Image (tube, rainbow, N blue to C red):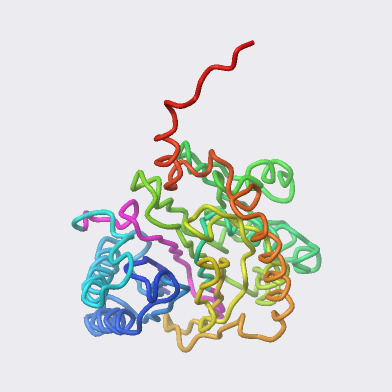
């Protein structure tokens, strides 16, 4: 049996209106490009989605991760959407495309990438999480709860296929290093690092029983690549569920208690991550608050079928209300921390440009 590859590649190539959503014409041209790739045999199936102003290309194929042809397809799709964005004068047209031409791998060129390759199980339910107005570390707490917290995931206690735990691969996004922790033995060591989501991010999770991949996230830091503020990373994450992995409900449960993430307005403020239906993932208030969309797919021989929009469920209404109350409280703090990010996390925002003008006005304090 041949492995299937699930690739989720996203980019902001023009917001409608401002930073709120994606114009339907951009998604239409993306669907057209990917449909051509299915006819050519490059892709098995695809679905074009959006969370806020980011286009998410959800694709299945049999070419493995980091395949140049798949990455070039995504790049060319984003280029075609950018041309439409420019014609419509959309805000930030092509902002996530940091290179002038494709160079073999889309990683490091601006778009975010999450890919996994696996043998399709007799039943293969997967969830694609898509966030807007936040950074890759936003997945740290949910992934920890899904794969390491027995108060969230009952299967860690009662399912023999999960009882031996999982291994967590963590990236240091500042020094470009990685480390793997075996959970539950090293759970406290893991928390030392992932509790600092601005620097350390969970890249992938694997079953210690089978070695199978359970989750993978995008960890691209757009502002670090560009060397200046060009927008937030708006990460994506893929989670396999059931049969040795968290149940669908266990994978969704972390979002029932909204947690604070960095991003929101100008990428410079903490805010609650609101679980939203795709149609409601249109950040407007203070360009936010940050949103997360969860689309479930039942893979069948590589075909995605129609998605289940999980956060459209009324069971998440209270989470949304809680998030809005948190947003009300934080907004009253205005430009003060902890609503505004600490200075060290704003290195790639526009604030240093303002501070630079004032450096000559500082005088030594006389003792």
Residue at (44% x, 33% y) in the render: 358
Front residue of this view, candidates 62 and 189: 189
Residue at (49% x, 25% y) in the render: 362
In the rendered image, residue 6, in percent from the top left (x then y), is placed at: 43, 70
Snapshot quadrant of residue 355: top left
Residue at (45% x, 88% y) in the render: 305
Magenta-drawn stretch contains 145: no
Residue 204: in sight, yes or no? yes
Q: Is residue 313 left or right of residue 79?
A: right
Front residue of this view, candidates 31 and 302: 31
Residue 3: in sight, yes or no? no
Q: How many marks?
A: 0
Quarter containing the N terminus: bottom left
Q: Is residue 228 left or right of residue 51?
A: left
188 lies above or below 119 = above
Front residue of this view, candidates 111 and 171: 111
Snapshot quadrant of residue 247: bottom right
Quarter containing the C terminus: top right
161 lies above or below 27 = above
Instruction: Pick out the residue farthest to the left.
Output: 101
In the rendered image, residue 332, in percent from the top left (x then y), is placed at: 67, 59
Front residue of this view, candidates 37 and 275: 275
Q: Is residue 214 left or right of residue 94?
A: right
Instruction: Pick out the residue farthest to the bottom.
Output: 306
136 lies above or below 310 = above
Q: Which residues are magenta?
A: 102-127
In the rendered image, residue 346, in percent from the top left (x then y), is placed at: 50, 44
In the rendered image, residue 235, in percent from the top left (x then y), is placed at: 48, 61
């Amino acid at each position: 049996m041949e492995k299937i590859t699930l690739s989720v590649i996203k980019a902001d190539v023009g917001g409608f209106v401002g930073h709120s959503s994606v114009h339907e014409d951009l998604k239409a041209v993306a669907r057209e490009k990917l449909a051509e790739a299915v006819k050519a045999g490059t892709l098995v199936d695809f679905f074009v989605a959006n969370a806020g102003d980011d286009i998410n290309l959800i694709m299945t194929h049999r070419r493995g991760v980091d395949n140049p042809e798949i990455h070039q397809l995504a790049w060319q799709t984003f280029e075609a959407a950018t041309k439409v964005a420019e014609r419509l004068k959309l805000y930030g047209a092509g902002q996530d495309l940091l290179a002038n031409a494709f160079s073999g791998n889309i990683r490091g060129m601006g778009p975010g990438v999450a890919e996994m390759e696996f043998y399709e199980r007799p039943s293969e339910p997967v969830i694609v999480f898509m966030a807007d107005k936040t950074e890759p570390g936003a997945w740290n707490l949910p992934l920890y709860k899904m794969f390491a917290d027995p108060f969230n995931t009952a299967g860690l206690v009662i399912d023999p296929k999960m009882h031996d735990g999982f291994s967590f691969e963590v990236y240091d996004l500042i020094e470009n290093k990685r480390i793997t922790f075996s959970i539950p033995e090293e759970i406290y060591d893991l928390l030392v690092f992932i509790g600092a989501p601005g620097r350390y991010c969970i890249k992938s999770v694997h079953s210690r029983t089978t070695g199978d991949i359970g989750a993978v996230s995008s960890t691209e830091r757009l502002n670090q690549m560009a060397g200046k503020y060009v927008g937030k990373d708006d990460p994506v994450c893929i989670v396999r569920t059931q049969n040795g992995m968290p149940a669908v409900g266990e994978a969704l449960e972390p979002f029932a208690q909204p947690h604070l993430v960095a991003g929101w307005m100008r990428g410079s403020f903490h805010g609650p991550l609101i679980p939203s239906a795709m149609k409601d993932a249109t950040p407007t208030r203070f360009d936010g608050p940050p949103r997360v969309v969860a689309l479930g797919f039942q893979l069948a021989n590589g075909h995605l079928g129609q998605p289940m929009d999980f956060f459209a469920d009324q069971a998440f209404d209270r989470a949304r209300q809680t998030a809005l109350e948190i947003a009300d409280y934080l907004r009253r703090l205005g430009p003060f921390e902890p609503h505004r990010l600490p200075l060290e996390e704003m290195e790639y925002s526009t604030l240093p440009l303002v501070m630079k003008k004032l450096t000559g006005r500082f005088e030594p304090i006389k003792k």
